[in-house]
Image (spheres, rainbow, N blue to C red):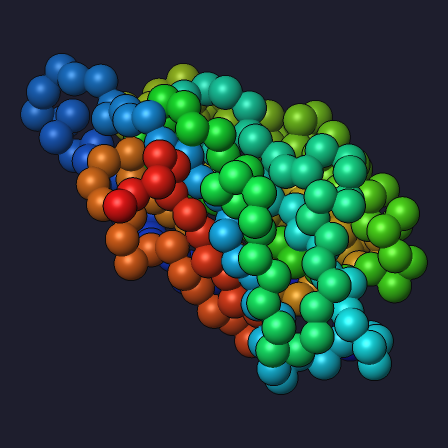
Amino acid sequence: MATTYVSPLLRLGVAADIVRPQLRLLAADASPPTAIRGLTIKEITLNKDFDGWFDDDSEIYFISTALDFSGKDPVVFPVGDATQTTLKLEPGETFRFSLGEGAPVFPEREITSGLVVQVHLFESDQGARDAAAAITKATDAVKTDGNLVKVLKQLFENPGGLAVDVVLGAAGEVAKVVSAVLESNGNDNVAFFTGYWSAEGSWDGKLEATQEGASIRFGELPPTA
């Protein structure tokens, strides 16, 4: 399969979910909405029609990035250790994260405006060592890429002025940085998920998504009944 990295697919919510609560700021001198929330990955399913490099179990890896609009750096998981995100799956099989509430995509803490989360699933023909190298490079790039740092700085300096194109721009820059690293390492894209969750309101109905290669189920923090 050819290595391809596509633009974010808006499978879980839309950027307007984050922007909409900001509209009332135009009529009142108020702070952006905040809430104590977080996100995990509960399950990842390799879809039945997936056709990877290997005849037996495929080794699938993932890297997630998550940011809110508080001014803090994006959260990247894992940090270097690819074994934390190594999934050996046959097509049609589901991996369930059994420790705690799931793989920690974004820690439970106060978020500003909302969350933008991206999950890259990929195959590495060189195995875990190559995957770990790619994840480390991607983590470093998210922290040091000059254009991304500039975009995030401008965004965080004016959180009350969020617009859909601004949120999409921030998400796009993060995706571009991570995708470029994975592509340069010769990894093969399995699926790419993007989600938008507002700091306010229910996340019900926005925690599961399916693409051609894989499906994913997120979990909300704190857990809901």
| Residue shown at the point (74%, 63%) measured from the top left | 88
- Horizontally, residue 164 falls left or right of residue 82, namely left
Can residue 188 be seen by looking at this rendering? no
Residue 198 percent location from the top left of the image: 29, 40
Residue 32 percent location from the top left of the image: 25, 23
| Residue shown at the point (62%, 84%) measured from the top left | 49
Q: Nearer the viewer, residue 91 or 75?
A: 91
Residue 11 percent location from the top left of the image: 41, 61
- In which quadrant of the rendered view does residue 21 lie? top left
- Horizontally, residue 104 falls left or right of residue 196, namely right
| Residue shown at the point (70%, 26%) measured from the top left | 144
- Horizontally, residue 86 falls left or right of residue 101, namely right
- In which quadrant of the rendered view does residue 212 lie? bottom right
Q: Nearer the viewer, residue 13 or 45?
A: 45
| Residue shown at the point (58%, 67%) measured from the top left | 94
Residue 171 percent location from the top left of the image: 49, 43
- In which quadrant of the rendered view does residue 96 lie? bottom right
Quarter holding the N terminus?
Answer: bottom right
Quarter holding the C terminus?
Answer: top left
The residue at the far left in this view is: 27
- Give the mark count: 0
141 shown above or below 101 = above
